[in-house]
Amino acid sequence: MGIPHFSDGRFKSNRLTITLDDEAYAFLELKANGNRSAYINRIIKQEKQRIIAEKIFQANQEEAQDSYQQQLQDWDITVSDGLS
């Protein structure tokens, strides 16, 4: 499912009502510089990017451990043997 947007490329926005405890609300007020929505949007986007980067890292780790990498190295040695 794609992100809803207008034909001119702007993203649609949605309203949300949430409940925060006093400590979380005080922190939000302190850090948001008067624009809670922008602050929350920024935090959510940063978390999304962190999760994507983590998944990419995990996939790269799995690939590095895969025997496929060893097979490539074996072929590189085989191909270079006897070539001048």
Image (cartoon, rainbow, N blue to C red):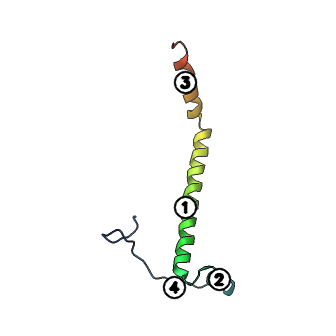
Looking at marks 3 and 1 on the same chain, the residue that comes earlier in the sequence is marked by 1
Q: Position of residue 75 (x, y in %)?
A: 54, 24
Q: Position of residue 52 (x, y in %)?
A: 54, 57
Structural distance between the alpha carbons of marks 4 and 1: 24 Å
**Amino acid on which the number 3 mark rests in the picture:** Asp
**In the rendered image, which residue does mark 1 sit on?**
49
Mark 4 or 2: the one toward you: 2
Residue at 58 percent across and 66 percent down: it is: 47
Q: Is residue 12 left or right of residue 56?
A: left
**Amino acid on which the number 2 mark rests in the picture:** Leu
**In the rendered image, which residue does mark 3 sit on?**
76
Mark 1 element type: helix
Furthest residue in direction right, as rendered = 23
Mark 2 element type: helix
Q: Residues within 10 Å of mark 4 (few under 14, many from 20)?
A: few
Q: Position of residue 6 (x, y in %)?
A: 33, 72
Structural distance between the alpha carbons of marks 2 and 3: 58 Å
Which of the labelled discs sits on residue 30, or is there none? 2
**Amino acid on which the number 1 mark rests in the picture:** Gln
Is the residue 79 above or below the residue 33 in the image? above
Residue at 67 percent across and 87 percent down: it is: 22
71 and 22: which is toward the camera = 22
Looking at marks 4 and 1 on the same chain, the residue that comes earlier in the sequence is marked by 4
Structural distance between the alpha carbons of marks 3 and 4: 59 Å
